[in-house]
Image: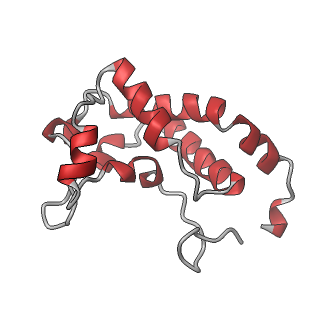
Amino acid sequence: MLKDPFLNEPFDPRLMWFIGMFDVYDREETRGVELEVYNPDDTGDREALIRKYCLDLPYLSHRHKLVLLENLEVKLADPTYDFQHLFEIDPCEAASWPREEWDSLENPRGFFEEIYKLAIEVWELDLAKASSEDRSIW
C-alpha cells in the first residue's frame, strides 16, 4: 500500500497536493509576497506557478506522482467535476491565498488541465518508472 509521505497512513491523491503550497496563511510576509506578483489567470504566470510550485514536489516519490496524476486525469475526464471548489476557502479555516482573486479563477479547470499537461512533461521519467513497476508491491 502506498503511504502518505508524511503520515503512516494510505496516500490520498487529493488535488490539493498540487495547489496546497499556495496557501499563505501565517506566511503572508514571506510566501505571500513571493506569490502575489503572479496572476493565476495569466497564461505565462500560470505556467511559471505550475512549474515552480505545483510540480516541484521532492517529498513525493515517482509512485505518488503517478497516482496523483491518474487521479487528476479521472477528474479532468468528468465534465461535471467542480475544480473551483478547490480554490474556495472556508472562512472558518486558517487558510488564505496570496491574492483575493485566487478564490474565483476565470478557468479553474484550465489551471488543472495545464498542471496535467506540464506534469506529463516534467515528471516523464518518474511516471515511466512507476508505470513499469508492479503496483502490488507498493
Compared across the picture, whether 93 is left or right of 47 comes to left
Residue pictured at 54% horizontal, 58% vertical: 13
Residue pictured at 83% horizontal, 66% vertical: 136
Compared across the picture, whether 128 is left or right of 81 comes to right
- Give above or below for 108 relative to 57: above
Residue pictured at 22% horizontal, 37% vertical: 36
Residue 33 lies, in percent from the top left, at 21, 42
Residue pictured at 14% horizontal, 40% vertical: 100
The reply to whether residue 24 is visible in this rendering is: yes
- Give above or below for 8 relative to 85: below
The reply to whether residue 110 is visible in this rendering is: no
Residue 88 lies, in percent from the top left, at 23, 50
Quarter holding the C terminus is bottom right
- Answer with the quarter of the image where residue 123 lies: top right
Compared across the picture, whether 104 is left or right of 86 comes to left
Residue 114 lies, in percent from the top left, at 48, 28
